[in-house]
Image: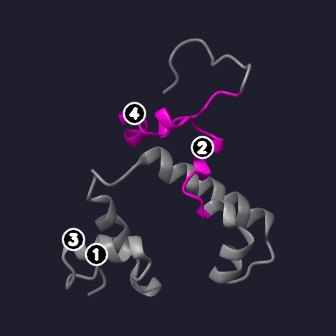
Amino acid sequence: MADLPHLSDDEFLAALEAGTLPEARFNHVAHVRALGKSERYHEAITIAFMSLIHGQLWHQAEGGDWEEFRVRNPQLFRSDALLAYYPKQVLESPEARARFLLMPLAGVPPPAGRCA
């Protein structure tokens, strides 16, 4: 039962999105199961939020629990949080869904050629 097999995929994803999966049960197998619904996965959003969350954890090294983190970082829970870093049309693009995109700094041209 480590991967919550008693739940259908739809039930599993609904519980994941609602935040009702027990933390102890959201192991590696559950992460892989969530990514198995590839039409729901968005690479740029996932990596961008992981980076923002990691940055806040690093700056707030004193630790704390989930509720303290949520209260100290309300900007991470805004539906438009990534619009400070990405134009909406980029986030909605098929390319951003498929791969992480770095956004160029304002006034700094991207490097010549294609980066892998």
**In the drawing, does residue 9 fall left or right of residue 14?**
left
Circle nearer the N terminus (1, 4): 1
Q: Distance from label 2 to label 1 (Cα)?
A: 29 Å
The structure residue drawn at horizontal position 50% and vertical position 18%, both measured from the top left corner, is: 114
Residue hosting label 1: 12
92 in magenta: yes
- Place of residue 11 in the rendered image (x, y in percent of width and height, measured from the top left): 25, 76
The structure residue drawn at horizontal position 80% and vertical position 63%, both measured from the top left corner, is: 59
Residue hosting label 4: 95
Going by the picture, which residue comes out furthest to the top?
A: 112
**Amino acid found under the numbered disc labelled 1:** Phe
**Amino acid found under the numbered disc labelled 3:** Asp
Which numbered circle lies on residue 9? 3
How many C-alpha atoms fall within 10 Å of the one at disc 3: few (<14), some, or many (≥20)? some
- Magenta-drawn segment: 77-105
Q: Distance from label 4 to label 2 (Cα)?
A: 17 Å
Circle nearer the N terminus (4, 3): 3
